[in-house]
Image: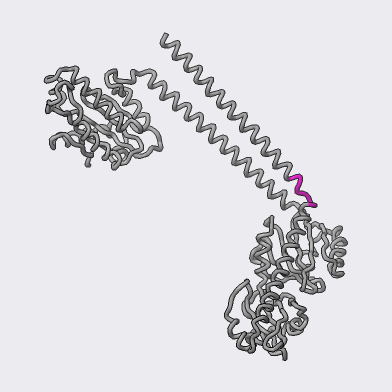
């Protein structure tokens, strides 16, 4: 009868495990199907029209950012005008060291054309004709981009009309790095392949503000020499029409062309206050789809690996549980008196644990009730059994949560503390020694001075030993040392 019950229990456990695995696989399969189907739908939605709309949004945001800079310059000039400074040179001296709003430098153009700026900036005013642009401010004007002699990087200068003293007219100028536009381009770009340029309609010169090649940021080039020559012949006519609309000052226009196997959507948008210059955004038409294809592949690989790892973990755990259960089912596991593990079950369980390739720190404790024979001789075997039961209960209270406890002999106990460091076990052994004194062989003689004590020796794995027999031997040696010192204490194995 016992064998039939064990066999049926095993069949039921296997069937329960298979049902759990089938449900798990079904749920994972449905989840993967829904996820991939959703990704495919999203990929279909990101076509050329969406890419073109995305380019237009970026261009509008970039254009708004430049307009924001002009508003900042206008506000600063209004603030300075309201303060009615008398001496423009003194005002320049006070403000020349200020830093704010991302500009490289600031200065003033006086009513008589006197320039309050550094020597390098004065040379740039003459070289780039900036003085003429200053007089165009109504209330703000902006220069075309040029390379700064102060920083060596592309910049542009904004001019704002202001007054000082008794109504004298002058101009505030703020020089901004193109990096201000570049930074906005990075935050607005939705794909790494997106390129953003400033383009001059007449010369077709371009200044790159954002793109996949970070080292090209701020570089000057000519569109014809850079990529127009590489276009497919069928697209050149459409591209020429696109350039013509740019020269006709049409606010915005898009063109689609191919270079090799790559299709591009390119959109320009007119820049306020920067005459002849336009913001151009170019995105590969497949950029969004390629990104999502990569994402889909990564998700599939990750989910497959996770599913495989989970399956392997489930199977290994199930096999180990079945093996452990088979071991315990074929043994008489518990000591009938104390209800802790017997010697054979304890040996098998600890050896099975120590055979694992990865295991946390653990301790083996050999514990002896001091002079237990005296209890039996003086009070009788029933009193001895009472001591053993109460002592085993104390061990279970202290070590039962994370340890294996065995009655190894008549009054000998072994404890295998799992995932425990020496300090943690030390504290428990100290409590064990103290609380053992409260155990009495009999309760009728309350004034009986006799009390129980115990001796305990411990060894750590892997510091002292790694195998079961060596670990047990080390703990036994430590127990012997405690007994030699007078018992009623604990100690650790010392090499």
**Position of 79 relative to 239 (above/below):** below
Q: Give the range drawn in magenta.
A: 43-49
Where residue 34 sits, quadrant-wise, is top right
Where residue 402 sits, quadrant-wise, is top left
Instruction: Please state which of residues 247 and 352 is positioned toward the viewer in this rendering.
Output: 247
Q: How is the image coloured?
A: one colour
What is the residue that sits farthest to the bottom in this orientation?
Answer: 112
What is the residue that sits farthest to the top in this orientation?
Answer: 1
Tell me where residue 262 appears, x and y as whole percent: 76, 54
Tell me where residue 76 appears, x and y as whole percent: 66, 76
Quadrant (top left/top right/bottom left/bottom right) for the C terminus: top left
Asked whether, in this view, residue 201 is left or right of residue 109, the answer is: right
- Residue appearing at x 36%, y 37% in the figure: 419
Asked whether, in this view, residue 2 is left or right of residue 211, the answer is: left
- Residue appearing at x 68%, y 77% in the figure: 147
- Residue appearing at x 32%, y 20% in the figure: 334
**Position of 141 relative to 231 (above/below):** below
Asked whether, in this view, residue 160 is left or right of residue 461, the answer is: right
Q: How many labels were placed on the picture?
A: 0
Quadrant (top left/top right/bottom left/bottom right) for the N terminus: top left
Where residue 194 sits, quadrant-wise, is bottom right
Asked whether, in this view, residue 167 is left or right of residue 442, the answer is: right
The overriding secondary structure of the stretch rendered in magenta is: helix
- Residue appearing at x 69%, y 55% in the figure: 191
Tell me where residue 339 appears, x and y as whole percent: 30, 21
Residue 132 shown in magenta = no
């Amino acid at each position: 009868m016992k064998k039939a019950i064990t066999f049926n229990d095993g069949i039921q456990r296997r069937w329960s495990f298979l049902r759990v695995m089938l449900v798990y696989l079904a749920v994972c399969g449905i989840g993967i199907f829904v996820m991939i189907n959703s990704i495919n739908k999203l990929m279909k939605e990101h076509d050329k029209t969406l890419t073109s709309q995305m380019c237009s949004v970026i261009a509008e945001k970039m254009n708004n950012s430049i307009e924001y800079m002009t508003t900042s310059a206008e506000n600063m000039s209004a603030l300075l005008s309201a303060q009615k400074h008398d001496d423009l040179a003194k005002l320049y001296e006070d403000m020349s060291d200020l830093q704010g709003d991302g500009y490289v430098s600031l200065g003033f153009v006086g009513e008589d054309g006197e320039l309050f700026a550094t020597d390098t900036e004065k040379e740039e005013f003459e070289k780039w004709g900036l003085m003429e642009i200053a007089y165009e401010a109504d209330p703000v004007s902006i220069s075309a981009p040029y390379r700064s002699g102060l920083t060596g990087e592309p910049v542009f200068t904004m001019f704002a009309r202001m007054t000082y003293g008794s109504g004298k007219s002058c101009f505030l100028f703020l020089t901004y790095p193109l990096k201000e536009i570049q930074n906005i381009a990075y935050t607005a770009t939705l794909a790494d392949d997106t390129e953003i340029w400033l383009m001059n309609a007449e010369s077709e010169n371009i200044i790159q503000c954002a793109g996949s090649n970070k080292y090209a940021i701020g570089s000057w080039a000519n569109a014809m020499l850079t990529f127009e020559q590489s276009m497919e012949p069928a697209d050149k006519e459409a591209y020429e029409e696109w350039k013509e609309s740019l020269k006709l000052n049409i606010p915005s226009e898009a063109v689609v062309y191919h270079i090799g196997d790559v299709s591009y959507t390119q959109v320009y948008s007119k820049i306020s206050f920067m005459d002849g210059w336009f913001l151009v955004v170019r995105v590969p038409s497949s950029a969004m789809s390629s990104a999502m294809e990569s994402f889909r592949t990564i998700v599939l690989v990750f989910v497959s690996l996770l599913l495989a790892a989970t399956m392997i973990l489930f199977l290994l755990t199930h096999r180990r549980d079945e093996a452990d259960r088979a071991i315990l089912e074929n043994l008489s596991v518990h000591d009938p008196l104390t209800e802790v593990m017997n010697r054979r079950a304890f040996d098998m369980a600890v050896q099975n644990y120590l055979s694992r390739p990865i295991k946390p720190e653990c301790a083996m404790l050999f514990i002896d009730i001091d002079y237990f024979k005296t209890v039996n001789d003086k009070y009788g075997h029933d009193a001895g059994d009472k001591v053993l039961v109460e002592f085993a209960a104390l061990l279970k209270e202290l070590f039962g949560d994370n340890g294996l406890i065995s009655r190894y002999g008549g009054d000998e106990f072994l404890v295998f503390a799992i995932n425990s460091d020496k300090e943690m076990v030390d504290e428990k052994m100290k409590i064990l020694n103290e609380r053992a004194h409260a155990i009495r062989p009999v309760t009728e003689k309350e004034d009986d001075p006799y009390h129980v004590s115990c001796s305990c020796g411990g060894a750590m794995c892997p510091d002292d030993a790694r195998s079961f027999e060596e670990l047990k031997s080390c703990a036994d040696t430590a127990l012997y040392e405690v007994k030699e010192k007078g018992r009623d204490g604990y100690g650790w194995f010392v090499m």
